Amino acid sequence: MIKEWIVGVAIAVLVFLAVLGYNVLPLFFLAAISVALWYMLDRRGAVSVAPREAMVKHQVSFDQIGGQEHAKRELMEALDFLKYRDRIRSLGIRPLKGILLTGPPGTGKTLMAKAAATYTDSVFLSAAGSEFVEMYVGVGAQRVRELFRRARALAKKEGKDSAIIFIDEIDVLGARRGQHSHQEYDQTLNQLLTEMDGMSTTQTPMVLVMAATNRPDMLDAALLRPGRFDRQIKVDLPDKEGRLHILRIQTQGKPLAADVDLEHIAGETYGFSGAQLESLVNEAAIMALRQNKQEITQEMFRDAVDKVLMGEKTGRKPTPEELQRVAVHELGHAIVSELMRPGTVSHITIAPRGNALGFVRQIPESDRYLYTKEQLEQQINVALAGCLAEELHYGNRSTGAQNDFMQASSLARTMVRCGLSRIGIVDEENLPETVLDTEVRHILSEQEKVTRALLAPYKEDIAAFASHVVEEESVDGDAFRRWLEGVHARKAQPEANAACAAALAPDGGRMVPGTEGLQAGA
Ligand code: ADP
Ligand code: MG
Ligand code: ZN
């Protein structure tokens, strides 16, 4: 407030002097320099020690958090300590001082803390761990003290009897003590522990500290002792149902076209965090705006998934030969993917995005937590199929398969580590690098043979469809499947005729059971 006043008056004086005909240039520079100086000192915390914590203006409730049912329930149970404080006190239960939320970024930890404040009718203050880290010893500790003081003051001012302090990225200041080259971090952490030890149930307003990290293993043990952050709540990536729930929340109030199938999108977005889903919905809406449409369509969602996964379309313009090669490569992935798990190709695209020149998006069957050896091998086959399709068609490979190889090797390494390779169960810690390497290479070369055999029958058919993909830029999974079925039908023709002939033979050639199965699995 005062700052604005000073600035305003100063400008008025300068203008006034200028109007009177004085040379105000030196004065102006002087003012600019002092403002810059003030700003720098302020940034360094020499002028004000208050961390730049933010107050929530709009309230967040648990209903606005999708999925995370388990975490929400656990958190609400813990918060009841704060909500029903009198009962807790009368039973002599130790108050809950800290709750640690752990999990990958963008899963809704900040949202949870805000919802906690709403649920318990507390004031909410937040700060990030990095804000306490300063050049000067003692400033961080002072900021911690200030933060607690502000929380209490704010609660009193707003007439609430509790406050929630949320510290994001607590690993920055709560890493194991003695690890850093200077003492600043240690002092800050000590101050936080001291503040938390000083809190009691009888205190009004009561303060609850919530903190978030995705590296709980990095934290100083002292932080996790009873009486500090003795509740740890895991906030994980959402499963399919959770994703659907989040999509429903994020699309609320947005005009969706009739063809939008949120369930389908939830199925396609395996591994997405809540924040990525939010960005997906936002991107789809931006596409509607750019195309001047009133509604968001399923296709816009599909493109938005590509964008969130692979990045923005790049301006790179591959030559026609390169495009044809990319199409052949991607068709290789798509064919093997479809042979292994029918119905899994969502679409094939050769528009350059991020680092990729093209890609095949697969629909995950369902969320998986366990993989069998066969499933891992199938994924390796899909990864290798790109470069092998190039080899089949052109007789040579290109540099475009680097990522595929990395993925295939990582899958093979997982197989070895999990005891799914020919050397059987291994002790991961004592597994020599050379043995791992040999096994990985063995798996890859075996699967290379399998993949090559899978693709061989399509040698003649790939080229024509690749040209079609180049023309269309993006081909839908259904269109691709129709083409593949056509190819299969044509190939099956001679054999079907042979089978008919056998059935008509006088010695009553019975159908051999499982013939089709064998063919598909070969
Ligand atoms: P974190 O703190 O775990 O990194 P945030 O809480 O900051 O994640 O989430 C960032 C944004 O992502 C939120 O503002 C919200 O729009 C969206 N989001 C994340 N998780 C969820 C969720 N479970 N439900 C609804 N929206 C979510
Ligand atoms: Mg956050
Ligand atoms: Zn590839």
Image (tube, rainbow, N blue to C red):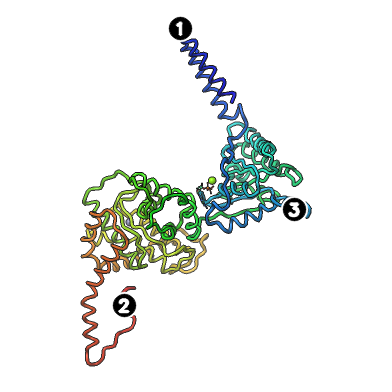
Q: Amino acid at mark 1?
A: Gly
Would you say 282 lies left or right of 110 here? left
For the residue pair 408 and 232, the one nearer the viewer reads as 232
Question: Where 481 sits versus 143, above or below?
Answer: below
Q: CA distance from mark 1 to mark 2?
A: 98 Å
The residue that mark 1 highlights is 21
Q: Does the Cβ of the disc 3 residue fall within 8 Å of ligand 1?
A: no
Q: Which mark lies nearer to you, 2 or 3? A: 3
Q: Amino acid at mark 2?
A: Glu
Q: Position of residue 375 (x, y in %)?
A: 41, 67
Name which residue lies at 58% across and 59% down.
70
Asked if labels 3 and 1 touch by Cβ distance under 8 angstroms, the answer is: no
Q: Position of residue 39 (x, y in %)?
A: 54, 25
Question: Where 339 sits versus 294, above or below?
Answer: below
Q: Does the Cβ of the disc 1 residue fall within 8 Å of ligand 1?
A: no
Q: Quadrant of the C terminus?
A: bottom left
Asked if labels 2 and 1 touch by Cβ distance under 8 angstroms, the answer is: no
Circle 2 SS class: helix
Asked whether residue 221 is in view, the answer is no
Circle nearer the N terminus (1, 2): 1
The residue that mark 3 highlights is 88
Q: Position of residue 41 (x, y in %)?
A: 57, 26
Q: Which mark lies nearer to you, 1 or 2? A: 1
Return the residue found at the far bottom: 507
The residue that mark 2 highlights is 516
For the residue pair 476 and 102, the one nearer the viewer reads as 476
- Label 3 CA crowd tier, 10 Å (few <14, some 14–19, many 20+): some
Circle nearer the N terminus (2, 3): 3
